[in-house]
């Protein structure tokens, strides 16, 4: 059964960052630093487990995390995420939203080269 038959959303967004891949990985692999590179995140709090180890759970609070009609009811919202996988060799990690069964988000980084280094960031859900 594919994603269309089950009604699950699937998508990918990507962009290039003007920084070497190792420097970008240092930032995005430290999940507690989420606030430093996601402007809508107000706070990121450890709930259980050890950061960077599968099973780690964090509470992420911020604006614009849910559709606009829900935002009108509250100034911010939150999601509870669990780290599913962390692969330093391939520079990727996968999280799941604890409240949404089957929700998976993966961030993968690729060396994009160039003067001074560049990184292709791919987020899939």
Image (cartoon, rainbow, N blue to C red):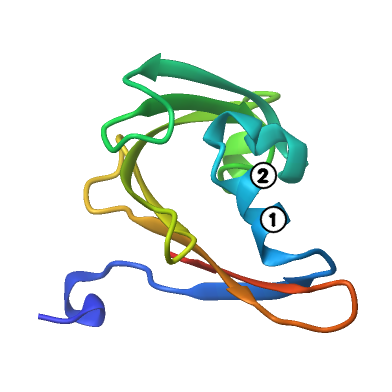
Q: Nearer the viewer, residue 124 or 48?
A: 48
Q: Dot 1, crowdedness within 10 Å: few (<14), some or many (≥20)?
A: many
Instruction: Give the x, y percent position of residue 56.
Output: 34, 29
Instruction: Give the x, y percent position of residue 95.
Output: 38, 47
Q: Nearer the viewer, residue 70 or 47?
A: 47
Instruction: Tell me if label 1 and label 2 are in contact, CB under 8 Å.
Output: yes
In the image as oriented, which residue stretches furthest toward the right?
A: 115
In the image as oriented, which residue stretches furthest toward the left?
A: 1
Question: SS for tag 2?
Answer: helix
Residue lying at 75% horizontally and 65% vertically, measured from the top left: 20
Residue 10 position (above or below residue 51): below
Separation (CA) of disc 1 from disc 2: 5 Å
Instruction: Give the x, y percent position of residue 11.
Output: 46, 74
Which disc, if any, is residue 27?
Answer: 2
In this rendering, would 74 be left or right of 90? Answer: right
Number of numbered markers? 2
Q: Nearer the viewer, residue 56 or 12?
A: 56
Residue 50 position (above or below residue 102): above
Residue 7 lies in quadrant: bottom left
Q: Where, quadrant-wise, is the N terminus in this rendering?
A: bottom left
Residue lying at 36% horizontally and 27% vertically, measured from the top left: 57
Residue lying at 22% horizontally and 46% vertically, measured from the top left: 101
Residue lying at 17% horizontally and 79% vertically, measured from the top left: 5
Q: Where, quadrant-wise, is the C terminus in this rendering?
A: bottom left
Which disc, if any, is residue 1?
Answer: none
Residue 93 position (above or below residue 108): above
Question: SS for tag 1?
Answer: helix
Which disc, if any, is residue 24?
Answer: 1
Q: Dot 2, crowdedness within 10 Å: few (<14), some or many (≥20)?
A: some
Instruction: Give the x, y percent position of residue 114.
Output: 83, 84
In this rendering, would 11 be left or right of 109? Answer: left
Residue 106 position (above or below residue 63): below
């Amino acid at each position: 059964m594919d994603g269309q038959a089950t009604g699950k959303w699937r998508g990918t967004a990507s962009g290039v960052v003007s920084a070497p891949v190792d420097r970008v990985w240092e930032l995005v692999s430290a999940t507690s630093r989420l606030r430093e590179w996601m402007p809508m995140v107000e706070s990121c709090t450890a709930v259980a487990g050890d950061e960077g180890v599968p099973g780690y759970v964090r509470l992420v609070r911020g604006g614009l995390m849910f559709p606009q009609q829900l935002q009108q009811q509250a100034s911010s919202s939150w999601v509870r995420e669990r780290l599913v996988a962390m692969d330093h060799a391939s520079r990727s990690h996968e999280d799941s939203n604890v409240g949404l069964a089957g929700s998976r988000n993966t961030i993968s980084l690729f060396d994009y080269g160039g003067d001074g280094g560049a990184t292709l960031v791919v987020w899939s859900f």
